[in-house]
Structure formats: C-alpha cells, structure tokens
Image (cartoon, rainbow, N blue to C red):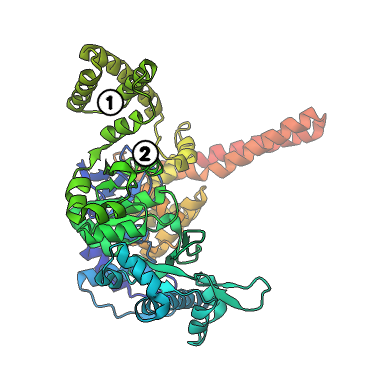
Amino acid sequence: MAGVLIPDEVIDAVRNHHDIVEVVGKYVHLTKHGKYMKGLCPFHSEKTPSFTVTPELQIFHCYGCGKGGNVIRFVEEMEGYTFPEAVRMLAEDAGIPVTWSSNVSGHSQEQDNVRNKIIEAHELAVKFYHYILNNTRQGDEAKRYLIERGLTDKLIDQFMIGFAPVDWDVLTRFLINREFDPQLLEKGGLISVKNDGDGYYDRFRSRIMFPIRDRNGKAVAFVGRIVGEGQPKYLNSPETMLFTKSRMLYNLDLARPAIKKAKQMVLFEGSMDVIKAWSAGIQTGVATLGTALTEEHCLLLKRYGDEIIICYDGDSAGQAAAYKSIPLLEQSGLKVLVALLPNGTDPDEYIKTHGGDAFRHGVVEQAVSVTKFKLIYLRKNHILSREEGRNQYIVEAVKIVAELDSSTEREIHLKELSKEFDISLDALKQDCHEFRVQHQNFKHQRDNNQFSWNNGRNEKRKTERSSTVLPAYVNAERRLLHVMMRNRDVALAVHDKLGDSFNIDNHEAIAAYLYAYYASGYEADAARFVATLEDDELERTATELLMMDGGFPFDDDIMDAWIQDILKVPKLREIEKKKEEAVRAERAGDVMMAARLLQEINSLERELKNYLQ
C-alpha cells in the first residue's frame, strides 16, 4: 500500500460494495460456466477464454498469464493504478468518504513529488505554448497554417494546441523562473542538456505543439509538428516515467466517454486526423504516437470497446500498416472493420475536400469487414490483366475466404469471385473446403497443446504446466491450502500438526500469512485474505489455488494423510541424496565410505517407516 494508511474497514467496505462480476463486466464480456464466469483475458492476447471470475469468492484468475486477485487488484491492473489509487476510485464510485491519511515512505514520497512536478511543468508548458500561438506574432504563421488545415479557434482551444517558438531557451527560462529544477525538466523530456554540458535548451522549437494526456487528462508529453521545412516532420517527447509510446494513445482521455457509450472506436495514424475527425462528429477517435500499433495498445483499446474501425491513410504505406494491425487487434478480442479512403488521401485531406458529413457517413460508417479489406488489398499485389496474376489472386482469395467461420459469408464472397472471373462456384467451394480442412487440421494440432494461450509470453508457463503429473506432496500442499483458505478450523488444525513445514516456498509463505490472518481474528474470506498478501507472485499463487476444482474428498483422515505426504519429503530427499553419494563412493573405489552411507540410508529408511506407522 506504499505507506498510505487506509483503514481496514474502508477496504472491506469497498470490496463489499463492488461485486467483482459487475466491475470486471465493464471491461470483459463474461459468460456463465457453472459456478464460474469466463471471458477473454484483458491482460494478454488469447482466442480461447482462460480468464475466470468466481462470484462466490469474489476473485479472478487467468490460467493463461497467471494474473489474479480481488476486485481492487483487478482495477489496479486494468487502470495502472497503485493500491491506494484503486481503493480511492472504488470508494468514490461507491460514495464512501475518502478520509484516510497518508504516511508515505521517503522514497515513495520523493517519486510522487517528481511525478507531480513533471506534470505541473507540462501543464504550464501547454498553457505557455497555447498563449504564444494565439497571442503573439511568433505564433502567427503556425496559426495561419492550422486555419488553412481547417481547424477552428474552438478546436484549437479544445485540444489546447500551441506553438513552440524558434528561440532556443524560451520555455527553459519560463519554467526555471518559476523555480522548476532544470534537471527535473530534462528528466520529464521538456528540455535538453547542451552538448558542452553548460546549460539547457528547449527540446521543441519552431513546432506546432499537440499535448499528450494520460488517462486522467493530465499533460505528460507532446507531439510537435515542424512549421516550414525541416526534419523530422513530427517530433515526440522522449519516453519518461510518465510517457511510454507503446502504451499510450492520443486523445484517449477525451474519447473515452464516447467510446464507452458506443463500445466502438476509430483508430487513426496521427493527431491531426483525430482532431479533424472530431470536428466531423467522430468523437471516438484515437491515434498511436510515433510508433506502430503494439499489443499493449490493443489491450488498452479492448478495455473500453468491443469494435474498432481502422482509418489509416489511403496510400500504400497506410494500407500496409492497416493490414499489419488487423491480427493484433483481433487477437485482443476486438471486432475489426476498415474504413477505405479513395485515391491515396488521408482523413484530414478527405474532410477538408468533401466535408465532415461525407467523411462520417461515406467513409467511417461504410467501413468494410476484414475479409473484404484483405481481398481489396490482395488485388493490388497482382496484375489481374495477366492469366498468371488472376490465377494467383483467385487461389489466395479463396484461402482468405476459407478462414471465415460463417458459411453464409463464405458463400457471398465465393459467388462474387465466381461472377467476376467466370469460374464455377462448385470448383471454388471445393478449393475452399480443402483449405478449411487444412486450416482445421493445423488448428487442431496447435490446440492439442493443453495450455496454448496464443501468446508467446506464456511459452514458459505452457511447458511447465503441460509436464507430467505433479508429485503427491505437491498436490497435498495445493489441496490443503485450498481448503485452509476456505475453512478457519482446518487452517488452525494444520497449524498445530504441520506448522510451516511446507516444501514449496510460495506455499510456506501463503501458509504463514494465513496463520497470521486467522490469528488476527478474521474469518475465512478469500478476497480479503488475498488482499493481505504483499507480493504479486503470492497473490497469483493463492488465487490459482483458490480457483482449483474443489471436488476432491476431504475429512480428518485425508488431511492427516496429506500432512504425512508433506512431512516425509525432507527425509526422502535426504535418503536420495545419500544414495547418490554412495554411488559416487563405489565408483571412486571408496568401499568404507560406501558401506557407511548404506548404513545411514538403512537407518533413515527405518526412521521413515516408523514415522509413517
């Protein structure tokens, strides 16, 4: 909790008020599977649902990536909040007074102060640049350019667009005069150190400035577009403690309410496209920030909507980028459509030429399916006036159609191909069927890997989990902890008979936390207990154990048998170790040592036998 003193009763009230199914359901489409709710994990890409919520215990767990915890942990993970931030958000949502105090450690307090100062500097820089654009002669050329591009004063004010003048240190002097530490400003990406190390200069000069804001609407970076000639055309802030390009999207703070309402968003290539689309009535637009679309972007988008329309430039580069983005977006669970722009135009140009209504109704609302886009894109790579080009196109087009699950959709596309190229529909269907059989066989082979979650980051986890049956003592520890977290009396009995003699480190640690939890007077409450664990790995392990199938038999005799399985492990390991030493002694010709070790082994085996009796 990073030193923030939040009363236990507040944490309990927050958990009790927010049903985890309702909270998770705002981000993930859940379906009922017996006593569980399942859906596609919002934390990693997958096609087979491995994300599970149990209403009974008020916890979640993903069998793919391993994340798990209670409702507070879910909000932490989804929104990138700290524990106190997540509790505060949930408390405010529930109408619970936020009255707790802070007692933050020196390091945490220092980090918070640095973050807040960098944000404060950026907010001042936004106002400074905006003032220069609108109220000084230095900003006249940039203002004319924006007006020529179709931006109104209202849009300029709404997006707080500004201008960084050509002067080398105007922002530097402005902020230092307001007692900002230049080293902190450099750390925040606003200024740079001179080559000779003597002083600082502005990072952005002679550029139109577009503020980049975090999820809370706070300025954390900039995109600067050059005015006149010069390179690079666009310059982003460097990555800082507040700004990571692969995890942030331009305009998400303003678009988020409209996206949540529509459950749909439009993905553009740049900030100017987003702003012009906003003027055309498209208020669900976002854009990447000087980087290709990443898996992190896609997972972020999936948190807020179910459907996305890609609206990239109509030139070959833009269409190629759109084509590459489709698999990433689909793997995150989004339904993907593609808006088509004619004659290599970009959204900004199209709106300027044809108007906002034409863009909204004729481009965005007429977005085509992924299959349709792939077929259009494919045509451009073949010379259809030649027989070889036509044949190659038809074969590849049928392969694309074969990927569709809907037989109706396949029929529609095959009929179009049959009519256009005067080919028998039956022949196309036969080829399509053969491609589908090949595709299904490949998919079946891939899905035979029990824990294949379609995510490279889980290869290690897949290998570990698909191995041989777990040893008896491991199963005993897992099942015992499963019951202990649900039953206080069992936990107390295990404490007396077994104590901390678990053989797996994480199990031993969870047991220690559990003993302390019950010793504090708490009753069995899985979600509450998980919240007391001060380690992410322990949280994941505890949640996984709680989500185990509890259909196994359990009574005092079974509990005692499990405890024996656990207690005998150190003795068995010692016997195995001495057997290995005896073998080495025999090979080395040390007969006396080998004989002594065999005697010790016999003694240990007798002790073990007597113990088990």
- Tell me the crowding category of disc 2: few under 14, some 14 to 19, or many 20 or more residues within 10 angstroms, Cα based: some
Q: Choose between 352 and 259: the one closer to the eye.
A: 352
Give the residue type that dot 2 points to.
Tyr
Task: Provide the secondary structure element on which disc 2 rests.
Answer: helix
- Dot placed on the residue nearer the N-terminal end, 2 or 1: 2
Which residue: 51% across, 69% down?
189
Q: Position of residue 222 (x, y in %)?
A: 43, 67
Q: Can residue 19 be seen in this view?
A: no
Would residue 588 appear left or right of 249 to someone viewing this image?
right
Q: Is residue 409 visible?
A: yes
Distance between the alpha carbons at the discs numbered 2 and 1: 16 Å
Q: Choose between 290 and 514: the one closer to the eye.
A: 290
Residues at marks 2 and 1 touching, judged by CB atoms closer than 8 Å: no
Q: Position of residue 234 (x, y in %)?
A: 45, 60
Dot 2 corresponds to which residue? 323
Dot 1 corresponds to which residue? 401
Q: Which residue lies furthest to the right in this view?
A: 589
- Viewport quadrant of the N terminus: bottom left
Name above or below for residue 167 compared with residue 82.
below
Would residue 354 appear left or right of 225 to someone viewing this image?
left
Give the residue type that dot 1 points to.
Val
Q: Position of residue 166 (x, y in %)?
A: 50, 74
Which residue: 55% across, 73% down?
186
